[in-house]
Image (tube, helix red, strand yellow):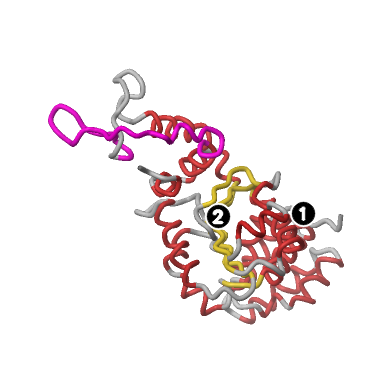
Amino acid sequence: MLDSFDWIRLCRSSSELLATLTLLEKEPDLFQQEEIGPPFSALDQPCGRCLIYPRGPVHDPGDYCPTCWRIQNQSRKLHLRCRYLTTVLGTVQRLEEVRARKDFLADARVEARAVLGDDTFLVFMQRYALRPWLQELGLYHGARLNGLLQVLPITGIGGGIDSADVLARALHQGRRFPSQGLHVRFFSSPHLMFQSHVRDRQGLLTFTLGEFLSLLEMAAIFRTLLRPDVQEILQQILDLSDPGELRFYWGRFLGMLTPEARDMLAAWGIRNWPKERVKFLYELTNYVGFYSTT
C-alpha cells in the first residue's frame, strides 16, 4: 500500500508536511492501513484526501480515512509554527554509512525527519538552526558526503503550486546533479524552483558547502552590525538606478553608520554589487541569527 514517500507526496502545505513527518516518526502504526476503500458511487466513496482508503465513521472522521483525518487535525495546530521553519532535502551517496558514524538526522536542531530511500532524506528545522547544523555536518561528514542539499521554501506556496510540487521538482533536480563533493542549493521562494536557470546564470543558486556557510556568515554579520531600519534604507539606496542620486545618498548614509558597519560595507564593496546579489544577501538574513564567535 502507500509507503512513507507516498504519504509525503499527498501533502499540499508545509503544515501537512510537518504533521506527516512527525506522525511517521512517532506513530508509524497509524500508516499501516490495509483495507481499500469503495469505488466512487452515489452511495459511497473513498477518503476525500488520499482517495484510496475507506472513510471513517460519519461522526469521526467523516470525509477522511483515520490517517488523513489525523494529519489534517495535526496540521491545523502547526500552521503558525511552520512560518519559522525551513526544509532541507538531501540527495547524497552512502547515507546509511555516514549516519552510522554520527547520525546528523538525530541532531536536536532537527524537528522532523524522514529517510526517503538509500540516498535521500528530508528534514525540518528552525531557520536560524540551518547555519550551525550545516557547520556540524561539514565538520563531521564533509569529507565523506557527496551529493546535493537543497534548502526549500515550503511556506508562502500558492498560485497552483503546493509542497508536493516543490518536493517532486527538487527530487528531480537532485538526481541529475553530479555527485562530486557536497553542494548546497538555496531557494528563497517556490517560483524559483521552476525558474532555477535564472539564478543559476547569475551564480546565485549552487554553492559548495564551504561557500554557502561563508555567505551565511556574511549575512549574520550584516544583520548584527546594521539595525533593521538601516538595512531597509540601504536596500532602497542600492536600488536606485541613477548613479548621481546614488552617490548623493550614499555619503549621507555612511554618516549614519558605526565605524564597524562602514568598514564592513567598504570591504565588501556592496555599493558596486549587482542588484540580484544584494537581493540574495537580504534573503539570507532571514536564515541567520546575530553573529557570534562562540
Number of numbered tags placed on the structure image: 2
In percent of width and height, residue 188 lies at 54, 60
Relative to 11, is 254 on the left or the right? right
Horizontal arrangement in the rendering, residue 187 relative to residue 7 (left or right): right
Q: Which residue is mark 1?
A: 290
Please state which amino acid type lies under the numbered disc 2.
Phe
Q: Main SS type for the magenta part? A: loop
Q: Quadrant of the N terminus?
A: top left
Q: Position of residue 175 (x, y in %)?
A: 47, 68
Q: Residue at x 38, y 54 (%)?
A: 161
Q: Which residue is pictured at 78% across the width and 69% down the height?
A: 254
Magenta span contains residue 49:
yes
Residue range of the region highlighted in magenta in the rendering: 23-50
Q: Which residue is most to the top?
A: 59
- Seen from the viewer's position, the closer of residues 121 and 11 is 121
Mark 2 or mark 1, earlier in chain: 2
Q: Quadrant of residue 59?
A: top left
| Residue identified by numbered label 2 | 121
Whether pointer 2 and pointer 1 mark residues with C-beta atoms closer than 8 Å, the reply is no
SS class, disc 1: loop
48 over 244 or under it: above or below:
above
Q: Magenta span has 170?
A: no
Q: Residue at x 42, y 33 (%)?
A: 72
Q: Is residue 228 above or below residue 186?
A: above
